[in-house]
Every structure is written in C-alpha cells, then in structure tokens.
Amino acid sequence: MQQKTEVNKLSVVVMRICLSGIFLVAGLNHFLKTEKTVARLEKAKLANLSAWIASPENLVLLSGGVMLIAGTSLLIGYKTKWAALILMLVLIPITITIQVGQASTLGPLFKNIAIFGGLIFFIINPLTQKQT
C-alpha cells in the first residue's frame, strides 16, 4: 500500500510551468536556429547513434515540434502524464547523443537528469493534471 502525501496545488502548477519552459525554449530554438542545432548534433561524439534514424536536420525539426507540442501541453496542464512521457522519450536520445559523450561538462548531463526527475513526477502522479 502506498502512503499518500499531500502536495500544494500551487507548487504543482509552478513546477509544471518551470519544467515546460526548457522544452518550449529548446523547441523554438530547433526551428529558429536549426543550422546551429544541427551543427551541435553533428559535432557530438555519439552523433552516429542518431544517423540511422533520419538526417540531423529532420531529427532537429521533429524533436523541436514534439517539444513545442508536448511542452505546451505540460504548460497548460493538459494530459500532463502523456506530455511528460513524450518529453522524456525525446530527452533520452538527446541526452545520450549530446550529453553523455561530453564527460568534461557534466553540468548539462545532470541538468537533464534533474529534468527527468521533474518529468517522472508528472508521469507517476496522474492527479497533477487539470480536472476537466
């Protein structure tokens, strides 16, 4: 039996807004700064892991679109569990491809690990969604 813990509703809203922001900004940058994002992907030590899926440009645009849609859903509290799950599925290959191969800069890797923690919160706590 799981023990229930009460969480302040305002803290959930604030967490949702803060967490969604990184995906909205990153998704927008994937469209506004496509060439720069593609270049970063191509320079990554583990870039070859994504090469079999699609071209770097297509991956950047696809992930940008997914981040904007799911990030917006998370922001407004619509289907937060699914939005968080989708964002996690997008963040996993990005983290492996871009962050894991850069052991000299562990900050971005641990930033992504912290983001995973926030996403997991919304995945395992489905009551954090708006009641419609």
Image (tube, grey):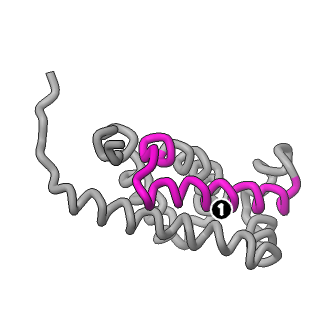
101 and 26: which one is in front? 26
Residue 72, x across and y down, in percent: 52, 60
**Residue at left 56%, top 68%?**
24
Image check: 114 left or right of 125? Answer: right
| Left or right side of 6 for 26 | right
Residue sitting at the far front: 132
Provide the secondary structure element on which disc 1 rests: helix
Magenta region, residue range: 55-84
Q: Amino acid at mark 1?
A: Ile
- Extreme residue toward the top, this view: 1
- Neighbourhood count class around disc 1 (C-alpha, 10 Å): few under 14, some 14–19, many 20 upward: some
> Where in the figure is residue 83, as x and y percent of width and height?
50, 47
Image quarter (top left, top right, bottom left or bottom right) of the N terminus: top left
Q: Main secondary structure of the magenta part?
A: helix
- Tell me: residue 60, above or below residue 40: above
* Residue in the foreground of this view, choosing between 104 and 129: 129
In percent of width and height, residue 66 lies at 65, 54
Residue underneath mark 1: 98
- Whether residue 69 is in magenta: the answer is yes
In the rendering, at what x and y percent does residue 14 appear? Answer: 30, 66
Quarter where residue 10 is shown = bottom left
Q: Residue at 37% x, 60% y: name it.
A: 16
Q: Is residue 59 magenta?
A: yes
Residue at image position (46%, 55%) is 74
